[in-house]
Amino acid sequence: MDKKLKSIAQKLAKKFDGQLDDSLEQARVIVPSGKIVELCKELRDKHDFESLTGFSVVDYHPQTEPRFHLIYQFRSIAQNIYLEVRMELNGSELLVDSVTGIYPGVNWYEREAWDMFGIQFEGHPDLRRLLMPYDWEGHPLRKDYPLGYEEVQFTFNYDEIAKRKPSPKE
Amino acid sequence: MGVEQKLGNLGFVTHKLEDVVNWSRTRAMWPMLFGLACCAIEMMAAEASDYDMSRFGMELMRASPRQSDLMIVAGRVSRKMAPVLRRLYDQMPEPKWVIAMGDCASCGGVFNNYAVVQGVDEIVPVDVYVAGCPPRPEALIHGVLALHEKVQTETMKDWA
C-alpha cells in the first residue's frame, strides 16, 4: 500500500478510535458513529482530500449493532490516493450529522441514503426523497423491506386475477 | 386497377366513409416518443432505415402528446412514472391508441417487485401487446400492422 496513504489511515484510525483494515491493498478505516464532520474536516484541511467521490450505505440486517455501514470514499487528486471510511451505525439511532457543509457534492447521496435506508442527516439543506415518489412509505433498500411480489397472470388463473387487477377508466 | 378507371368522366368516386376515414387514420398514425428502457432501442431501430416504419406512414415520432395518435410504451413503467404516463395519455387528442411494447409494459416482465407497474393496462387502455424482451423491430412492426387492421375494422359506432 502507498506509504502516505497508510500513515494517513493510521493517524485517522488512532484519532477517531477506529480500526484500520488494509486487506486487498486498500485503505479502509472503520470508525464508530459520531464525529464524522470532524473527520471530514481533518481529511479535507490537513490531508488534502479534495473530494468525496462516493457515499453509500450497506444494511447488515438482522444484525443490529451495528446495523448499517455508511461508506464514505475520499479522493485526493493531489496525492493520487483513495481512502475509504466506514462509519458504523446502530439500528436504533438513525440520526447522523450531514457532511454537506464540508463536501457539498454529497447532497444527493445523502438524499438517496434517506430515501432508500431511512437514515436522517442532521443539517442537510434539503432532505427529500431522491428516487421514490415523494408520498412513498418505507425505505426500499432495507433488507427487511418486502419485495412486493404480485401473482402473475397466466391462462389458468386469468379470470381470478382480472377480478382484482386495476384497470383504467376511459 | 387504378383510381382513374373508377373515376370515369365524373371526377369523383363513391366509397364508404368509414373506410376512407379509417384508411387515412392508419396511413398517418404518428407515434409518440415514449422510450422508457431497452425496448426504446428496438423502437428506434424499427424507425430507422433498415426496417423503416415510414413505409406505413409512421416515420414521425412526435415528442409532444398533442401531435400524436399512438403511444408506444417501450419499457418498464415505474410507479413514479405511472401518473406521468397517464397524464400524457390524457393529453393526446382523440382518436388515440396504445401499444404495450415488450414484456415489461405488457405484464411487468422480470420486474415483479414493488417499484414497477405490472402491465400498463392497469393505467391506460392497451390495444396491442407486443411480446418479447425486447421484441425485435419486425415484432413491433407486426404489432403496428395488427393495430392498423384493428383500426380498419372500426365502424362509425365506435367513433361516437
Image (tube, coloured by chain):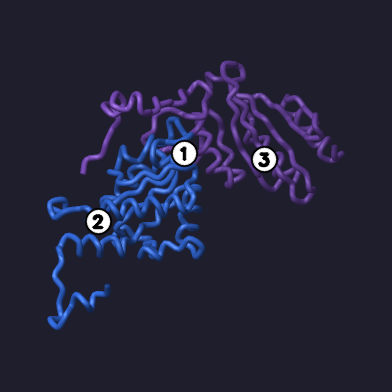
Chain colours: A purple, B blue
Disc 3 to disc 2: CB gap under 8 Å: no
- Please identify the quadrant where the N terminus of chain A is shown: top right
* Residue shown at 32% from the left, 55% from the top: B70
Query: Which residue has dot 2 on it?
Result: B152
Crowd class of label 1 (few under 14; some 14 to 19; many from 20; radius 10 Å): some
The residue closer to the viewer here, A70 or B76, is B76
Res. A41 mark? 3
- Where B100 sits versus A90, above or below? below
Looking at the image, which is closer to me, A112 or B134?
B134
Q: Position of residue B56 (x, y in %)?
A: 37, 63
Image coords of residue A60 (percent x, y): 60, 22
Q: Which residue is mark 1?
A: A127
Tell me which corner region of the image, top left, top right, bottom left or bottom right, holds residue B60.
bottom left
Q: Position of residue A104 (x, y in %)?
A: 58, 46
Q: Give me the chain letter of mark 1.
A: A
Q: Residues within 10 Å of mark 2 (few under 14, many from 20)?
A: some
Disc 3 residue type? Lys
Give the Cα separation between the discs numbered 1 and 3. 22 Å
Given residues B152 and A8, the one toward you in this image is: B152
Q: Earlier in the sequence, mark 1 or mark 3?
A: 3
Horizontal side of B133 relative to B160 (left or right) equals right
Query: Which secondary structure lies at badge 1?
Result: loop
Which chain is home to disc 2?
A: B
Asked if labels 1 and 2 share a chain, the reply is no
